[in-house]
Amino acid sequence: MNLNRWIDGLIPQNLLAQKESIRKARIVVFIHLFLIIMIGVLGIQSMFITEVPDIPVFVLIFFFVGFLLFFKYKGSFLISGNLIALTVAAFLGPQSLTTGGLFSDDLLWLILCPLIAFLIAGKRSGVLWGIFLLGFTAYLYSIELDPSTSLKEQVLTDDPKYLFVSLFILFFIMLSVILIYEQEKNSFIHLLKEQSARLLSQKNEIEQKNQDIDQAHQALLEVNTNLEQRINQRTSSLKKSNEKLLQSNQDLEQFAYVASHDLKEPLRMVGNFVQLLEEEYTEKLDEEGRSYIEFAVNGVKRMSVLIDDLLQFSRIGRKDITFKKVDVNLLVGEKLQNLQQVIKEKNVQIKIAPLPQAIICEKSQLGVVFYNLISNAIKFNDKKTPIIEVSCEEHEQDWHFSIKDNGIGISENNKEKIFEIFKRLHRKEDYEGTGIGLSLCRKIILRHKGKIWLDSTLEKGTTFYFTINKNLKNE
Amino acid sequence: MSNGHPIEILLIEDNEGDIILTKKAFERGKIMNNLSVARDGKEGLDYLFKRGKFENVSTPDLILLDLNMPEVSGQEVLQQIKATDELKSIPVVVLTTSNSDEDILRSYKLQASCYIKKPVDFKQFGEVIQTLQNYWFTVVKFPPRN
């Protein structure tokens, strides 16, 4: 509605934003406008009666326009309500003294003061203005008690119609005030009810959601507990089996160690006495007898080597090792020195790329790895000039070593087998050895947190690769 | 020993086979010697301390000691020898089957004069004993006898 929008234009912004205060602000503006119009009408009316313009009436209009603007910029209900009441009282109070006192219709109009104060400025102001009105009435009454000071004669008009109109307007105003107040209260209550209903439904919703969440949480907890129990069970069973494994591994290594120790004693007896027999009774034996003894002695020697290898293999796992800084160039040089004779015999060409000068490892074990891989490269080689290349690459986590030869090569299906203990691919007449070398190498590399593998082409050659972890720590 | 006095050797060894083999090997040597045998660690200590039936034996010039013996082990015998003033100057050669670094290291720590692994091959064993004889009886000067 246009009127509404026009009225809203006179309401301060901060009050427009609040739903409860818009209505009240509208009433304030409406009262201002109503009073301005009313006073205007009364002024014009009085002009017709007295034919002289009633100046205070127009001053009042200016006052109210001022108040309206004050409200527009200040937006205070308390001040605006009391200002209106005060103006009305200031205008009507003195006027009632000149228009008949207790019998003046202006006194009736003074009821506007507590009404306006009550409606706009609040209950407390309304009551205060009510007390003021009662006091003023009592004052007028006290004047009336003394006939000499009675103001009764000053009543301008005794026209009952005029009184009736005044009473009717007052009644109408009071009714409006009560209606507005009720409506506001109701609308406020309604608003509150609505909000509380909304809150209630929201609360219910939240409670429902909470319940759902609780249930889900409960279910989750159960699942969690179950899971935890299962994990604990698994962990403990894993722990047990790990302990068992460790124990059996230790047992096995201990067994291998003891067995190889104790096996050697009787073996030595057999070997030595068979030889002693050969030496001391050589005339009594024929050629065949001596060849039997040779077989026996050879068997004993081979077994002795096997036992030594087994002993060495078991000791790799059994011994506590200490990792230290090692210059690999020196280590490989040492190992080549040990192989000097065979290198010369087979005319081997060895190319060694610069190797790391300081890696953390167990020196003697890494030496075993180089010795075995290099001696294998020489052994399994039928070229006129065997060529062996040793090199190393530095990676982020480990060192990658490679030992390349141009030897007989290893077929695809044997690439894994060769790492098994005592596994041999050739007849011992062709290539000697027990077959422990590579399994020993793998065990050592594993202790260095590395891996060993190979690339090979038959007749062309083999390259062995192995890695040594860079972050080895002594336990 | 230039004065022709036979070398006194004590072999402390529990294995009958090794005793025979050692005796045979020494017999083949060119140097005159008296090889006495104690058949376990306890007997060895009795011999060295001249207890019981060993009251009249002479103190050996060289001791050959086996490490793996029941009851009193070779290590214990070695410890006792080195802890006794009259005996600690006698060279002790440890003879054993064991090839392990730990056994070797332990023997040297106990002040064994040298450590010899018994070979599987008798010919080799003979050579070892021969070398031993050459070394101890011709090259090395023994501590003077009291």
Image (cartoon, coloured by chain):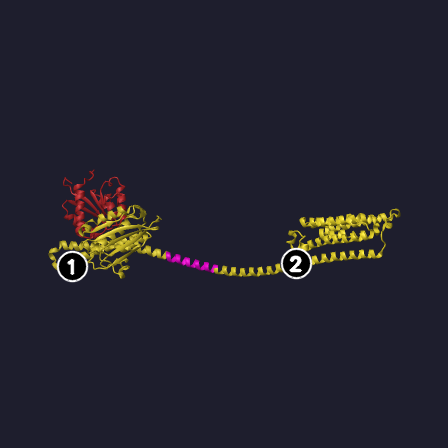
- In the picture, measured across the screen, residue A152 lies left or right of residue A450, that is right
Label 1: element kind: helix
Q: Can residue A56 be seen in this view?
A: yes
Q: Name the residue under label 1.
A: A292
In this view, the mark in front (2 or 1):
2
The verdict on residue A231 being magenta is yes
> Which stretch is magenta?
A224-242
Taking the view exactly as shown, the residue that stands out farthest to the left is A283
Q: Name the residue under label 2.
A: A191
Task: Identify the disc placed on residue A30.
Answer: none
Residue A72 spot, x, y in % from top left = 68, 50
What crowding class fits label 1: few (fewer than 14 Cα within 10 Å), some (14-19), or many (20 or more)?
Answer: few
Disc 2 on helix, strand or loop? helix
Secondary structure mostly taken by the magenta-highlighted segment of the chain: helix
Q: Which of marks 2 and 1 is nearer the N terminus?
A: 2
Is residue A35 found left or right of A257 in the rendered image? right
Which residue is nearer to you in this view: A179 or A292?
A179
Q: Position of residue A149 (x, y in %)?
A: 87, 46
Q: Can you give x and y, in whole percent of width and height, for residue A405 in the image?
A: 24, 54
Q: Give me the chain that's yellow.
A: A
Q: Residues within 10 Å of mark 2 (few under 14, many from 20)?
A: some
Residue A254 rendering spot, x and y as whole percentages: 30, 54
Identify the subunit bearing mark 1. Answer: A
Chain depicted in red: B
The kind of residue tagged 1 is Tyr
Residue B83 belongs to magenta span: no
In the image shown, does A333 or A33 lie closer to the viewer? Answer: A33
